[in-house]
Image (tube, rainbow, N blue to C red):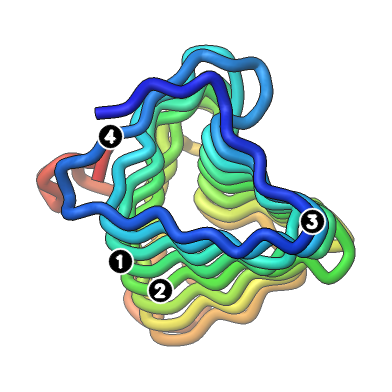
Amino acid sequence: NYTLTDISYTAEAEVALIGNGNQDVTGNTAGGLIRTGANAILYIDNVGLTSNLAGNILDCAGQSVWLDNSTIESADSIGLDITNGCQAHVRSSTIADHGSDAISVDGNATTLELINSFVAGANDQICIDITDGSADILYRTIGANFGTSAGIRCNAGGDATVRNSIVVSRSADPEIACAGITISGTATEGTNGSGQNTGAVQDAWFANYDNG
């Protein structure tokens, strides 16, 4: 396991962090635990980014980040913060248990691609919050929690496409609050004409609702 102050990749950096499933990276920094900027490209495969006691875990403001077979858990703030036109690709991974949004998308041309993964939010937090930018969600399970939580929320500048996924919330508020969303083949608690209406979520459907 590794404890970091922080790591920052900028300029023309192209870096890969590859583990075998036994590596956990933790830290205690007010900035992002791992940050990218400028034209940096970051690949993370089979690594656990498991704690930052003072800030975000992964900040992408560079060209792109690719997260495969990995976890982002227990940030004091945002789990994955995508800004400045970054293109984030998350596949076969879990992002859960954060003090703020699990994933935040904010910036012109900023994009998020999520495939075959699990995203869970804490009480009163948003699983995927799209302020400006877009998200393409496929074969995903998104589970929001109690209070003012939501699975997917978009502001006027955000849009999302959700296909063949599950979006639910323990909250009495809607699990999806996004005018610019296109949904198909997806199970939700509401009636959206896209697939199965699940009714109220049941914890027994999941092995570990809070942490994936």
Instruction: From the top left corner, tell me how far across and down residue 76 is, in percent.
Output: 52, 19
- Depth order, front residue of 97/73: 73
On screen, residue 203 above or below 183:
above
Q: Residue at x 57, y 38 (%)?
A: 34
Task: Say what secondary structure mark 4 lies in.
Answer: strand
Please state if 96 lies on the left or on the right of 42 as rendered: left
Earlier residue among tags 3 and 4: 3
Residue 167: image tag = none
Q: Secondary structure at mark 1?
A: loop
- Residue 130, by quadrant, is bottom right
Percent of width and height locating residue 191: 48, 70
Residue type, label 3: Ala
Residue at the spot x=66%, y=47% of the render? 9
Q: Position of 50 compared to 81: left or right?
A: left
Q: Disc 3 marks which residue? A: 11
Label 4 vs label 1, nearer the camera:
4
- At label 2, the amino acid type is Ile
Element at badge 3?
A: loop
Foreground disc of the pair 2, 3: 3
Label 2 and label 3: CA atoms lie apart by 28 Å
User: 100 and 181: which one is in front?
Assistant: 100
List the residue tagged with mark 4: 24
Asked whether the residues under the numbered discs 2 and 1 touch, taking CB atoms below 8 Å apart as contact, a structural biologist would say yes
Kind of residue at disc 1: Ser
Query: In the rendered view, does 19 fall on the left or right side of 31?
Result: left
